[in-house]
């Protein structure tokens, strides 16, 4: 399997002023295309340091792939460093001049090219030029005498992604004769700690060669990824199917979907299948539950609506939370959460009412009610109310996000018919 190292270029990345999303996209695309990624690096706008980094990468791997530093400004130094690393020179590439003129005309700019725009067409001699369909800076692949390469793409994500798909990946496949690709299927679980998922499937890590599996923990959920190397999707599916069946048997309850399916999507589908409906009463989550649900196409089949009851007067007026309950127990309490969930059922006419109340912080805590204390309640019309108390770590936003996931997990477990695992939701 051919190997590469990824280098993102720009001082703003090193200073934390720009979040690098390019390297993760490139890594995923390469992995899916059967190209091995040895390492990822970031380098500032310094010709000597970048050249040294590229020289080292070419000693370790078959090639390097870079993004950034191809623009018209004086700190765009990638081409000089690449030429030094592969031992070539730079020269004006006339077809790129024409492409830049056409692109600028499409942007509504006329007249002769400025000197800095012309600099974008000065490229390593003997390389392969990659057309930029979304910007002015051409990409290129510079070749060293021993056949190793440095492929350079713009740092603008939309420009990079199109160039990677349309030019670089086809070149890599032809260059290295790559026939097999990596195909994946991801099982999403909720309510099972990462350590427990690992315990249930750990023997497969040692047994499997192709496909392989990996465990990835997220906020309140754990994914199990199955990765198969095959010539096409059909062949990969044949490899993946028995492993998926084995994983489902080992993991048991808690798998809510695969690949792009979200937990909210699974909830909507299950409620609609049951012919039931859902309403929400939210305080700490501030409408996040309703937002997650209505992002699902067709949520109107079963979602009646939500009430954001942040102030106590709203809890009383719109959810029928008794004033005496608020006085006796406070807004952040088991009793108020239960009343809110019942109010969602009754006021919205829904089968299920899901409610949240808590202290997101950084203020509002008391001696017996710390920051992060959250109550989530699930009522079923005509039935009992299930209330869970959790204390969630993190910043205000993290507490609210985790409360959302815990609430979705609570109703999913009810729909799945498994109550025991709700209190063990991972908060990674």
Image (tube, helix red, strand yellow):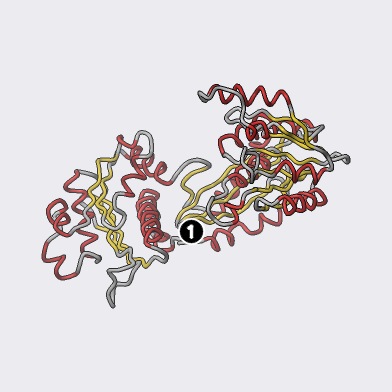
Percent position of residue 336, x then y: 21, 62
- For residue 363, side relative to residue 52 (left or right): left
Tell me where residue 393 sits by quadrant: bottom left
Tell me where residue 331 sits by quadrant: bottom left
Residue in the image at 58% along x and 60% along y = 198
Percent position of residue 260, x then y: 50, 40
> Disc 1 marks which residue?
192
Q: Which quarter of the rendered picture does the N terminus lie within?
A: top right
At mark 1, the secondary structure is: loop
| Residue 269 drawn above or below residue 104 | below
User: Among all residues in the image, which is located at the extreme bottom?
Assistant: 367
Depth order, front residue of 143/100: 100
Percent position of residue 376, x then y: 31, 59
> Is disc 1 surrounded by few (<14), some (14 to 19) or many (20+) residues within 10 Å?
many
Depth order, front residue of 355/168: 168
| Camera sees residue 1 | no
Depth order, front residue of 141/15: 15
Total number of numbered discs in the rendering: 1
| Camera sees residue 91 | yes
Residue in the image at 38% along x and 44% along y = 267
| Residue 222 drawn above or below residue 237 | below
Residue in the image at 24% along x and 66% along y = 333
Percent position of residue 276, x then y: 29, 41
- For residue 267, side relative to residue 32 (left or right): left
């Amino acid at each position: 399997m051919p190997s590469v190292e990824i280098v993102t270029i720009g001082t703003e990345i090193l200073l934390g002023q720009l979040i690098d999303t390019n390297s993760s996209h490139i890594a995923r695309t390469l992995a899916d295309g059967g190209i091995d990624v040895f390492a990822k690096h970031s380098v500032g706008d310094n010709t000597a340091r970048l050249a040294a980094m590229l020289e080292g990468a070419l000693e370790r791997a078959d090639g390097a792939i870079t993004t950034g530093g191809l623009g018209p400004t004086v700190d765009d130094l990638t081409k000089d460093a690449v030429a030094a690393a592969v031992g070539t020179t730079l020269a004006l590439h006339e077809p790129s001049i024409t492409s830049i003129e056409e692109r600028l005309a499409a942007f509504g700019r006329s007249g002769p090219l400025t000197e800095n725009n012309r600099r974008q067409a000065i490229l390593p001699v003997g390389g392969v030029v990659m057309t930029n369909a979304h910007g002015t800076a051409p990409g290129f692949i510079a070749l060293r005498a021993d056949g190793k390469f440095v492929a350079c793409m713009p740092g603008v994500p939309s420009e990079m992604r199109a160039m990677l798909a349309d030019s670089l990946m086809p070149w890599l496949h032809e260059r290295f004769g790559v026939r097999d690709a990596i195909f994946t299927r991801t099982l999403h679980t909720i309510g099972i700690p990462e350590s427990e998922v690992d315990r249930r499937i750990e023997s497969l890590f040692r047994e499997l060669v192709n496909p392989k599996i990996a465990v990835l923990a997220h906020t309140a959920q754990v994914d199990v990824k199955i990765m198969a190397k095959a010539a096409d999707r059909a062949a990969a599916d044949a490899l993946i199917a028995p492993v998926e069946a084995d994983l489902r048997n080992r993991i048991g309850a808690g798998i809510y979907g695969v690949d792009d399916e979200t937990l909210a999507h699974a909830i909507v589908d299950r409620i609609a299948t049951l012919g039931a409906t859902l309403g929400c009463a939210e305080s700490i989550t501030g409408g996040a539950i309703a937002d997650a649900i209505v992002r699902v196409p067709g949520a109107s089949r079963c979602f009646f609506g939500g009430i954001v009851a942040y102030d106590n007067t709203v809890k009383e007026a719109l959810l029928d939370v008794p004033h005496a309950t608020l006085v006796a127990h406070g807004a952040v309490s088991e009793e108020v959460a239960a009343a809110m969930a019942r109010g969602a059922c009754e006021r919205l006419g829904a089968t299920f009412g899901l409610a949240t109340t808590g202290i997101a912080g950084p203020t509002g805590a008391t001696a017996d009610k710390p920051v992060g204390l959250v109550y989530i309640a699930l009522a079923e019309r005509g039935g009992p109310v299930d209330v869970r108390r959790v204390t969630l770590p993190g910043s205000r936003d993290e507490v609210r996000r985790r409360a959302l996931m815990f609430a979705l997990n609570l109703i999913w477990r009810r729909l799945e018919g498994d109550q025991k695992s709700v209190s063990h939701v991972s908060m990674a």
